[in-house]
Image (spheres, rainbow, N blue to C red):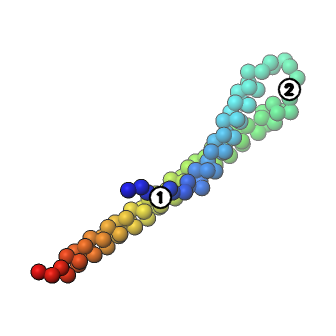
Amino acid sequence: MTTPPQHVNIYFRWLVPVVGLFVITLFAFIATLLGDPMAARSPVQEFLDRHVVKLFLGEVIAIVGLSLAAMALDRRQTLRHQSESSRSATENGAANANSGDALPS
């Protein structure tokens, strides 16, 4: 028996670009650290020097928040699915037991 396809949790969809942004920010920061210190600094390097802590903090908070929200929603959907499955199994079992009583002897 196949199960119908389930929709992907929206928080997981939001988590992918946020993690991607975190990785890009991390690589950009590493590139600024490895650059020539005597060379002229680019506007991106100046921006990262001033705001890298705020960027990382905001991105980490967003990743943790979205992860927790995704897990909470996933857990709620799982419990709802299990409840519906057990309810339908109970109803099917009761229907089969009642149909057995109605058989002629």
Residue 32, above or below 59: above
Residue 76 placement, left or right of 57: left
Dot 2 crowding, Cα within 10 Å, few <14, some 14–19, many 20+: few
Residue 25, above or below 40: below
CA gap between label 2 and label 1 equals: 55 Å
> Image quadrant for the C terminus?
bottom left
Dot 1 crowding, Cα within 10 Å, few <14, some 14–19, many 20+: few
Residue farthest to the right, as pictured: 40
Q: Residue 23 versus residue 29: which sits nearer the camera?
A: 23
Residue 31 percent coordinates (x, y) = 74, 25
Residue 2 visible in image: yes
Count of marks overlaid on the render: 2
Residue 21, above or below 36: below
Residue 15 placement, left or right of 33: left
The residue beneath circle 2 is: 41
Residue 5 percent coordinates (x, y) = 50, 56
**Residue located at (82% from left, 33% from top):** 44
Label 1 sits on what residue type?
Pro
Label 2 sits on what residue type?
Arg
Residue 49 percent coordinates (x, y) = 78, 33
The residue beneath circle 1 is: 4
Residue 64 percent coordinates (x, y) = 58, 48
**Residue located at (18% from left, 79% from top):** 103
